[in-house]
Amino acid sequence: MKALEGIKILDFTHVQSGPTCTQLLGFFGADVIKVERPGVGDATRKQLVDVEGADSLYFTMLNHNKRSITLNTKTDSGKNVLEKLVKECDVMVENFAPGALDRMGFSWERIQELNPRIILASVKGFGPGPYEDCKVYENIAQCAGGSASTTGFRDGVPLVTGAQIGDSGTGLHLALGIVTALFQREKSGKGQKVLAPMQDGVLNLCRVKLRDQQRLDKGPLKEYSQFGEGHEFGDATPRAGNDSGGGQPGRILKCKGWETDPNAYTYFITQAAVWKNVCDVIGKPEWKEHEDFATPAARLPRLNEVFGAVEEWTKTKNKFDVMEICNPLNIPVGPILSMKEIAEEPSLRDTGTIVEVDHPERGKYLTVGCPIKLSDSPVEVERSPLLGEHTEEVLQQVLGYSSEDIDVMRTDGAI
Ligand code: COA
């Protein structure tokens, strides 16, 4: 028994944001039917190709636990099939450019007419307003949602992050919206529209930066290194490098081997509660009682001096030794792990977070399994479907078409 067993998802998503959402629902046991254009499919199937002729890792890693059917929804019989799917499914998920679904003849009004219990879940770049008609990709969302202006170093250009907070982040927001709407439907008996705009999702993840924007009205942000460095603040939340920016100052510091290894670094947090342990471990016991260092407030203008001393110590240890030494002392630290190290980490394999999957076209590859663990809903990661692999199966078993009907649709170019 899986948490979402029995829930049918009409997965009309493509690229990354929508597919990450429906993949999660698939991990939780929903029957995810991915609808793709005949002969073409999701554009990511053929993007960033590393094995000629095979679906790319971009596609395979975002579309596990789904069935794929091909359908040209711009033909009459294709539209008929889509109507039947709308009637049959609990949720329809889409992330087309604004207006595409309406142009296809599937407005929210029409969808409700077909199935009043259905939940229509959409990712768009922006919510209602001046930019609602714009097409949006990951980095645009990071820029428009406040992430880029607050990421990077004070004296450098705005930076986008490696974490796909615009796409995968919004996919997560949408998934929560969907299960919440399913929960409400239990009581109301009705479906509803769920919208997750990428700008809003990124801003939600940048909530603390809007907090700092408002704190700035009351004076300088003392937790930011630039305060101690004597640089004036402007009128907007600045980029804070690797400062934690929260109540417990932290930074990325060099470890042994940093000269040649780009990831020989650790994150080190000087949590107030364990300050004395920090002083002992870095060989500065005199700072425990010194008026310039003994309290968090006294340390704030001196973060460069504090972290300079900590780094002198971390440079003598490798990043894993730092962890071994600091953890028993309750000092929060974390190694900067490369993707290679993560891919090879046995504990992540043990928990199913890194999974090896076998694929008929490309052979074995690694993927990220379900990052959310439910004790009563086990996840088996299934390989992504080939284009149209389940067209006949779904048309016959879910929608009741005969083989003759299917042959006609194939001749018409509808599937
Ligand atoms: N049969 C027939 N037509 C189909 C189809 C099918 N099975 N599936 C899609 N199409 C059509 C759509 O109806 C649309 O046609 P139209 O423009 O004539 O109305 C067309 O394919 C293209 O869809 P579109 O969404 O415009 O794709 P795009 O490649 O031009 O744009 C995005 C891609 C991602 C920029 C855009 O979809 C978007 O902004 N999405 C919302 C935000 C988002 O999710 N962005 C992140 C992506 S990771």
Image (cartoon, rainbow, N blue to C red):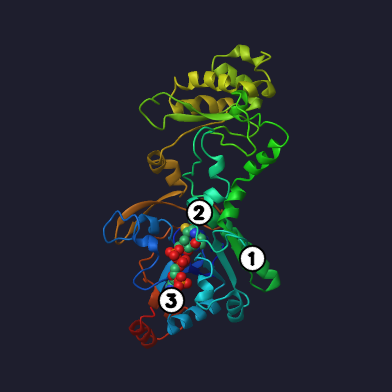
Residue position for label 1: 181
382 left or right, relative to 105: left
Task: In the rendered view, tell whether residue 262 sits above or below residue 59.
Answer: above
Examine the rendering and report whether any part of residue 22 can be seen. no
Q: Earlier in the sequence, mark 1 or mark 2?
A: 2
Q: Secondary structure at mark 1?
A: helix
Please provide percent x and percent y for residue 364.
32, 54
Tell me, yes or no, whether the two marked residues, 1 and 2, touch with CB atoms within 8 Å: no
Mark 1 vs mark 3, CA separation in Å: 25 Å
Say the numbered circle drawn on residue 394: 3
Mark 1 vs mark 2, CA separation in Å: 20 Å
Based on the displayed image, in which of its 4 quarters is residue 52 positioned? bottom left
Which image quarter holds the C terminus? Answer: bottom left
Examine the rendering and report whether any part of residue 294 can be seen. yes
Q: Nearer the viewer, mark 1 or mark 3?
A: 1
Please provide percent x and percent y for residue 233.
63, 32
- Which residue does the image show at 62% across and 41% down from the upper left? 209
Q: Earlier in the sequence, mark 1 or mark 3?
A: 1
Q: Amino acid at mark 1?
A: Ala
Q: Nearer the viewer, mark 3 or mark 2?
A: 2
Q: Amino acid at mark 2?
A: Ser
Residue position for label 2: 168
Task: In the rendered view, tell whether residue 382 sits above or below residue 147.
Answer: below
Q: Secondary structure at mark 3?
A: helix
Q: Residues within 10 Å of mark 3 (few under 14, many from 20)?
A: some
Residue reaching furthest to the right = 218
